[in-house]
Amino acid sequence: MSDTRINDVSAMRVWDSRGRPTVEAQVILRDGSCGRAIAPAGASTGSGEAVDLRDGGDALGGRDVQRALANIRVEIADALRHMDAVDQVAVDALLCRLDGTENKGRLGANATVAVSMASAHAAAAANRVPLWRHLAGDGDVVLPLPEIQIFGGGAHAGGRVDVQDFMIVAPGAESFDQALVWTAEVYAAAGQLLEAQGRLRGVADEGGYWPEFSSNEEALEYLSKAIEAAGLKPVDQVAIALDIAASEFGQRGRYKLSLDGDELDSDGFIERLGAWIGRYPIVSVEDPLAEDDEEGLRAFTARFGKRLQIVGDDYLVTSAARVEHAAAIGACNAVLIKPNQAGTLSEARQALDASRDAGWDAIVSARSGETEDTTIVHLAIGWGAPQLKVGSFARSERMAKWNEVLRVEAALGERARFAGASALGGRGSR
Ligand code: PGA
Ligand code: ZN
């Protein structure tokens, strides 16, 4: 029997996909097994998220993480030493107790999530299995439906387009591999269309094209055209998923669409979204209203919840309590799961479990600031989450995740099953 008690926890500063400092944690067990993980970072964050600890001051835009690293090296290492890494719930409960705040503000969610994930990796290593298998046990696993960005906007592209993510899903694909092939075709077709019209300005933070559009709706036109140009059938094979990230341009019931030159109230904005939903093959909408507009979210869900997946990100911030509340009042029907919004794996898992209890869909998601770390892929597969959102189909911090799913699919061979259309709970057909 291997000795899975924690022997040492260490930390170092590494760099994320925006060239900003972030936290890497390493957990070493008594048997020598080692796990390592890196904290990601959001740009369009919900106000209820667990918060990263940053140093402030002038250097590195105030974003250095020396205090978070010191917390791992001293307090966290001392507290976790001798704990069994296999008992993730106990490890995470100790991190929460040690931090002692509502939002991980003392130790830093960047410190706690990195350690929580590294500990899980160490436990899997001691078991001599990949993390997804360690989490899933011996049972069958299903590969998630990928949600992949084609155009980036909002906070990830200097606000050029108000809507943040114009994404596609491939519910008609037979395998994860095929979903990526179709995505590659749509991504290429979208790039060619933009190029031909002189609209291409580079790529946004998550690798999606950073386009020069004259309205938000024009992005939907281009995306629909790209799906058709790729020879794919809208809705049945490939459909559109949006992350409106409405908290970025909506407060107190007013929605300011800079690109469209419009300011709408909550009802007016719901009408606008409804027009887009009627005209384009949209099957999923994330944060359609701002996090402070619960009434708007309820109204939107009442109106479109039967045919659309309605995902709460900024509104739900990977919190089980918030999911339970939202399900009780009929706001949203799916949750985005970002481990660093919660600060530990166990809390993220609780939010996923709460969504299951509510009969909701769930999407495990990366952040806009990412690294080569592929932990979220293992969580999505190991926890049986039906969907995975990682950003676009370019830049290696994104491709590392998609490629990792392909490795699991290959390892499963004949036993590989793909969530496909079932991930959307039958939504999307109209
Ligand atoms: P973020 O964006 O990581 O910048 O918060 C991702 C999202 O809104 O889903
Ligand atoms: Zn979002």
Image (spheres, helix red, strand yellow):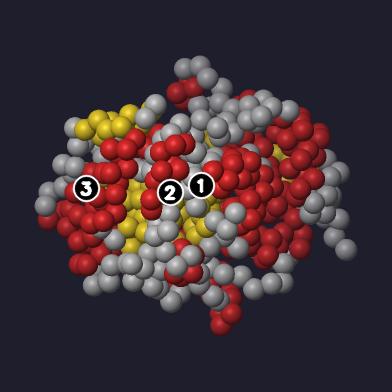
Between 171 and 70, the residue placed more toward the observer is: 171
Residue 97, quarter of the rendered image: top right
Circle 2/circle 3 CB separation < 8 Å: no
**Sequence-earlier tag: 1 or 2:** 2
Distance (Cα) linking label 2 and label 3: 21 Å
Kindly identify which residue carries mark 2: 301
Distance (Cα) linking label 1 and label 2: 7 Å
Q: Is residue 321 visible?
A: yes
Please report the residue visible at 63 percent of the width from the left and 27 percent of the height from the top.
Answer: 105
In the image, residue 132 lies at what x, y percent? 64, 62
Of the numbered discs in the image, which one, if any, rests on residue 217? 3
Q: Amino acid at mark 1?
A: Gly
Circle 1/circle 2 CB separation < 8 Å: yes
Q: Amino acid at mark 2?
A: Thr
Q: Is residue 369 visible?
A: no
Extreme-top residue of the structure: 57
Residue 139, quarter of the rendered image: bottom right
Distance (Cα) linking label 1 and label 3: 28 Å
In the image, residue 111 lies at what x, y percent? 64, 35
Q: Is residue 180 above or below residue 101?
A: below
Could you classify mark 3 by the number of other residues whose Cα lies within 10 Å: few (under 14), some (14-19), or many (20 or more)? many
Where the N terminus falls, by quadrant?
bottom right
In the image, residue 307 lies at what x, y percent? 39, 60
